[in-house]
Amino acid sequence: MSLKNKHIGVLVEDLYEDLELWYPVLRFREAGAEVTVIGPEKKGYSSKHGYPVDADVSMDAVRGDRFDAMIIPGGYAPDRMRRFDTMIDLVLQAHQANKIVAAICHGTWLLASARIVEGRTLTCYFAIRDDLINAGAHYVDKEVVRDGNLITSRMPGDLPAFCRTIAEALT
């Protein structure tokens, strides 16, 4: 499946889940998409296990509505990401422009902070299920859920279905 001429943003902060960032980055680059890693600053970040990634751009240098899809990996990074209004705004801009907004595992915390989960059907890592429910989402326990422009998954084992659903939504 070719994703040539598609531009995908992947958000990053320290303590990201290794596979949940790298699997989509590499898979979508291989499919021909332009993938941009976006951090609070243009600098290096470390995963939960110390694996490095460099942000291509800072959050202040881009707009969420300029991407075809925005991906939020999990780990503990989303708790750090949602401390920045600009990071929340990137997600909100993408959502309001009806772009694909995809979150896996704890990445759904950022969806809740952007206030875009109310009335939507989502999945997430079971430990933050109550956070989504309390934000107004309908939680289901499935490997991937697509509700309009929102795509969510639970954990690294769901990455094949997560990425396949994102790719299908972009074609």
Image (spheres, rainbow, N blue to C red):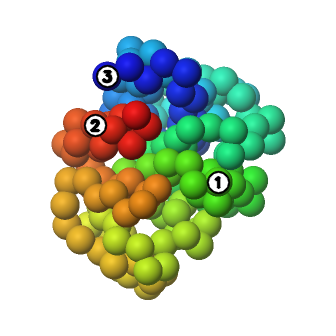
Residue 161 in view: yes
Q: Are marks 1 and 2 in contact (CB under 8 Å)?
A: no
Question: How far from the left and from the top, in percent, is residue 126?
Answer: 26, 67
Q: Is residue 102 above or below residue 44?
A: below
- Discs 2/3, front: 3
Give the CA distance from mark 1 to mark 2.
Answer: 22 Å
Which of 69 and 87 lies nearest the eye of the viewer?
69
Q: In the rendered image, which residue does mark 1 sit on? A: 97
Question: How far from the left and from the top, in percent, is residue 37?
Answer: 59, 30
Which of 96 and 45 lies nearest the eye of the viewer?
96
Amino acid type, label 2:
Arg
Q: Residues within 10 Å of mark 1 (few under 14, many from 20)?
A: some
Amino acid type, label 1:
Ala
Q: In the rendered image, which residue does mark 3 sit on? A: 1
Residue that extends furthest to the front in the rendered view of this protein:
171
Question: How far from the left and from the top, in percent, is residue 41?
Answer: 74, 35
- Specify whether 108 is left or right of 58: left
In the image, what residue occupies the spot 39% across and 15% down?
30
Q: Residues within 10 Å of mark 3 (few under 14, many from 20)?
A: few
Q: In the rendered image, which residue does mark 2 sit on? A: 164
Give the CA distance from mark 1 to mark 3.
Answer: 24 Å
Q: Is residue 150 above or below residue 29?
A: below
In the image, what residue occupies the spot 39% across and 43% down?
169
- Secondary element at tag 3: loop
Question: How far from the left and from the top, in percent, is residue 141?
Answer: 19, 67
- Discs 1/2, front: 1
